[in-house]
Amino acid sequence: MTPPDGTAPDAYAKTDRSRIRRNNVRARYDREAVHGVLDAGLMCHVAYVFDGQPYVTSTAYWRSGAYVYWHGSSASRMIRRVGVGVPVCFSVALLDGVVLARSGFHHSFNYRSVVAYGTAEEIEDTDEKLHALEAFTERLVPGRWAELRAPTEQEMKATAVMRMELREVAAKIRQGPPSDDAEDMDAPVWAGVLPTHRAFGRPEADPAMRQGIREPDYLKHIRFD
């Protein structure tokens, strides 16, 4: 059944906060697009208000199902504030290219972005928290968790894991060539896109690592999605 706002069943409902108004042709509310952007990123920005002042914290994140997760020090201001139900704005942006137009005004970026609104909760259950941290490690480097020692009790206490359900969320995506004015199309200036690419470099071994440890095979296949 289609929701009252006309959103398709496989899309997130549009709200006053999540509805994209500027350049709304770039808006995407379908889960496939939103999840695709989230699953391609590694770092997010978590914004909140504390004592009447706005703050934003950059941190690593991951998505699992209908939730986004992030972690931090249990003593951090962000964790202590967000963990008590303070409204949160969660955002991710990925740069795909620099758009060079025929006028400075129309220069732009090709990008993929997601903004989500909601409240976060701290995962208190120890087993669930450990599972979330495993999912985070495997999100970064598949195959890594099995090689690592188990977290200590103190490490678990010092680390908080937050999650927020994806309910009010939208993606905004720009792709393609410049959008120049018709009268500028014959201007004698180069126009187009300078693509950007994200890629991991060659692994650099820790000089303090003991001898005889070879580079793991999973590092040969790691890549950005």
Image (tube, rainbow, N blue to C red):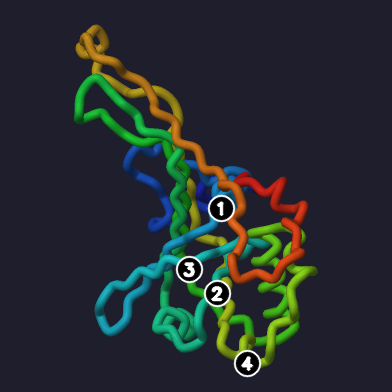
Query: What residue does disc 3 label?
Result: 118
Rounded to the nearest whole Å, what is the CA distance between mark 2 and mark 4? 15 Å
Q: Select label 3 or label 2 by which is in front.
A: 2
Rounded to the nearest whole Å, what is the CA distance between mark 3 and mark 4? 30 Å
Picture coordinates of residue 45 (x, y %)? 42, 63
Q: Select label 3 or label 4 by which is in front.
A: 4
Query: What residue does disc 1 label?
Result: 38
Rounded to the nearest whole Å, what is the CA distance between mark 1 and mark 3? 16 Å
Residue sitting nearer the eye, 164 or 24: 164
Residue sitting nearer the eye, 170 or 127: 127
- Label 3 crowd bin: few (<14), some (14–19), many (20+), radius 10 Å: some
Q: CB of mark 2 within 8 Å of CB of mark 1?
A: no
Question: As shown in the figure, which amino acid type bears the numbered disc 1?
Answer: Leu
Rounded to the nearest whole Å, what is the CA distance between mark 1 and mark 4? 30 Å
Instruction: Tell me which corner region of the image, top left, top right, bottom left or bottom right, holds residue 128.
Output: bottom right
Q: Which mark is residue 154?
A: 4
Does label 3 or label 4 sit earlier along the sequence? 3
Q: Secondary structure at mark 2?
A: strand
Q: Is residue 160 visible in this depiction of the protein?
A: yes
Query: What residue does disc 2 label?
Result: 71
Question: As shown in the figure, which amino acid type bears the numbered disc 2?
Answer: His
- Label 4 crowd bin: few (<14), some (14–19), many (20+), radius 10 Å: few
